[in-house]
Image: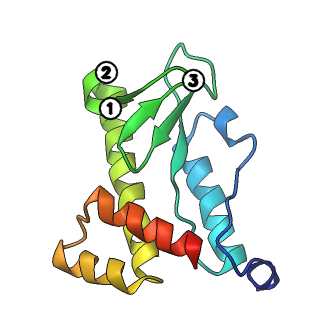
């Protein structure tokens, strides 16, 4: 696609305004649209997280760590959040992390080997190494 040809190096994409929508499906729809446009699945590092009573856009889901981040700190989901909301985001983080691994495995031989060796449950350090290789490529 033309967009992919213009960006031979890895690119960082910020999806403006998506943090204002209280809906995981809207974020995933935006990521799906990027995949369709670029011809490759984006590796999601952060996603919007919404909690009742909190200002929209005040929290992010750190996919790699499985944590919720605010402007002042990050905490593991299961430690600091109600079971209902935390469980929802923990499952979403696992899904997005699995997509990270699959996306990286499709373009990185070492990640593909790790994907097979660890049956998809690739350690964080190996994911970070694959991200570094992709950026340095």
Is residue 21 visible to us here? yes
**116 sits to left or right of 49:** left
Tell me if residue 68 comes above or below residue 96 in the rendering.
above
Label 2 environment density (alpha carbons within 10 Å; few <14, some 14–19, many ≥20): few
Expressed as whole percent of the image width and height from the top left, the position of residue 133 reads 48, 74
Quarter-of-image position of residue 17? top right
Residue that carries the numbered disc 3 in the rendered image:
71
Q: Is residue 68 above or below residue 98?
A: above
Q: Which residue is identified by label 1? A: 77
Residue 122 at x, y percent in the picture:
26, 65
Q: Earlier in the sequence, mark 2 or mark 3?
A: 3
At 39% from the left and 47% from the top, the residue drawn is: 92
Which residue does the numbered mark 2 point to in the structure image?
Answer: 80
The one nearer the camera, 114 or 15, is: 114
Badge 3, how many Cα within 10 Å: few under 14, some, many 20+? few
Callout 1 environment at 10 Å: few (<14), some (14 to 19), or many (20+)?
many
- At 56% from the left and 55% from the top, the residue drawn is 28
Which SS class for mark 1? helix
Residue 94: percent from the left, percent from the top? 33, 52
Distance of mark 2 from mark 1, alpha carbons? 6 Å
């Amino acid at each position: 696609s033309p967009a992919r040809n213009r960006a031979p190096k890895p690119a960082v994409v910020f999806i403006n305004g998506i943090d204002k929508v209280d809906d995981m499906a809207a974020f995933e729809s935006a990521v799906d649209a990027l995949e369709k446009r670029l011809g490759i699945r984006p590796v999601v590092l952060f996603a919007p997280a919404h909690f009742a009573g909190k200002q929209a856009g005040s929290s992010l889901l750190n996919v790699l760590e499985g944590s919720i981040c605010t402007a002042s700190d990050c905490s593991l989901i299961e430690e600091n959040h109600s079971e209902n909301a935390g469980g929802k985001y923990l499952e979403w983080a696992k899904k997005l992390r699995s997509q990270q691994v699959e996306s990286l495995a499709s373009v990185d031989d070492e990640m593909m080997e790790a994907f097979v060796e660890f049956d998809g449950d690739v350690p964080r350090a190996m994911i970070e190494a694959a991200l570094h290789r992709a950026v340095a490529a």
